Amino acid sequence: MGKRGNNEGSIYKRGDGRWEAKVTVGYSADSKPVRKSSYHKTRKEAQEEVRKKRNLIAQGVQLVEDGKTLAEWAALWHQSKKAELSTATWENYGHMLKIILPALGRLKLKDIRHMQLQQFLYDVSAKGGAPRSQSTMEKLQCVLHSMFKEAEKNELVVKNMAAGLKLPKSAVGRRDREAFTDEDVILVERQVREIPFLDAITVLLNTGLREGELLALLPKNIDRAGGCIHVTNAMTREKGRPKLGPTKTPESVRDIPVEPEIMALLEPRMRGEADYLFTNRTEGLMMNPRTFLEHYQRALSAAGVRYLPPHCCRHTFATRLFATGVNPKIIQALMGHTDYALTANVYTHVNHTDLRTGIQAIKAKSKRETA
């Protein structure tokens, strides 16, 4: 092996005429340095390789080989999420992994590429001949993104290969992507004192609460003096039965200001301090989601309002906030979302009025410029 050049680091000319670039990229479990070598035709190429590796190391990129499979990493990732997610959400992530791992689990994490993940979504979207629902496809996308994001943070991969994945067009859309119209909301609010359970729907429409958060409300969550609702818990299930549990994410713990009209609707439901505001037939106990849905459907029908799933009330709340120009960060906080992208992409809807307003704005601008 020949002598290395001055100030070039670990660069040597070999006996076969090639240049070897050797860089310490990390340390083993027993604290010994791990060095990587590459071979080049010229000294300049070797110098460039050393420079690239040093830049990556300076940026915090892990260059030490890690042989974890996706299945091994998924097990660690899933367990780490248990403390921060609701039981229902954590279990749902487990169901998504049962779809992902048979296809990708044996692959080494560091070797998986964006194209493979995208192809997986295309393949799994219509497995068995019937397209999967939009909801399932979004959850698969979410789990993949979260797993690779955490792997990137832990320096197991150079970057998040699941970033920017697109959902197949074949996925079946969901009705709970719709929002109630302004006319629907007016019909509900006009009859709220006359039709049982319209008060619950009105609260959902004006707060953006999730169904599980509404069912978990106790009198102590209602701040009469401050005029707000303290969201601290949500309904979860244990062996099929509803029980008080944590919110979906830490960001879901929040305060939602409410108007006096909404506070007045909640007042009659405040009984004993241990009684839930929206109770089952057994006084004071948490309402079963099936019972909630029965009351919800019956109330909408009596009010002459088309049926949309309860989650559409949450969509409606966010959409109306966007339409009135509320700061996006405020909407994110009110919705209890981890990031703004979810708020903007999932809970807003462009209607024909918005489109017409946009066209009219272009025409008005054109007239001003030509005047």
Image (spheres, grey):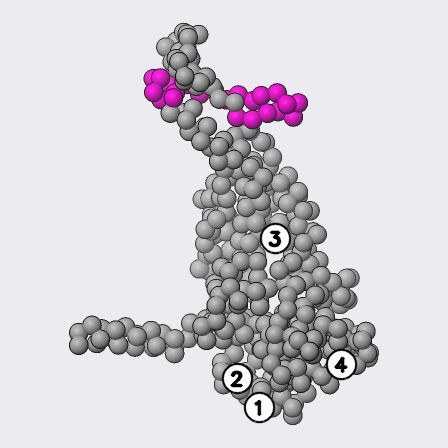
Q: Quadrant of residue 148?
A: top right
As rendered, which of 368 and 139 lies closer to the eye? 368
Quadrant in which the N terminus is drawn: top left
Quadrant in which the C terminus is drawn: bottom left
Q: Residues within 10 Å of mark 3 (few under 14, many from 20)?
A: some
Residue at which label 2 appears: 184
Q: Earlier in the sequence, mark 4 or mark 3?
A: 3
The picture places residue 109, in percent across and down from the top left corner, at 56, 38
What kind of residue is marked 4?
A: Met
Residue at which label 3 appears: 96
Residue 298 counted in the magenta span: no
Q: How far apart are the alpha carbons under marks 1 and 4?
A: 23 Å
Whether residue 296 is visible to the viewer of this picture, yes or no, is no
Which residues, given as a range, are shown in magenta? 25-47
What kind of residue is marked 1?
A: Arg
Q: Earlier in the sequence, mark 3 or mark 1?
A: 3
Q: Residues within 10 Å of mark 1 (few under 14, many from 20)?
A: few
CB-based contact (under 8 Å), mark 3 and mark 1: no
Badge 1 marks a residue whose secondary structure is helix
What kind of residue is marked 2?
A: Asp
The picture places residue 121, in percent across and down from the top left corner, at 50, 51
Q: Nearer the viewer, mark 3 or mark 1?
A: 1
Q: Is 248 left or right of 65, judged from the image as shown?
A: right
Label drawn at residue 270: 4
Q: Nearer the viewer, mark 2 or mark 3?
A: 2
Residue at which label 1 appears: 190
The picture places residue 243, in percent across and down from the top left corner, at 77, 66
Q: In this view, which residue lies farthest toward the front?
A: 225
Badge 2 marks a residue whose secondary structure is helix
Q: At 76% across and 81% down in the image, what residue appears?
A: 270
What kind of residue is marked 3?
A: Met
Q: How far apart are the alpha carbons under marks 1 and 2?
A: 10 Å
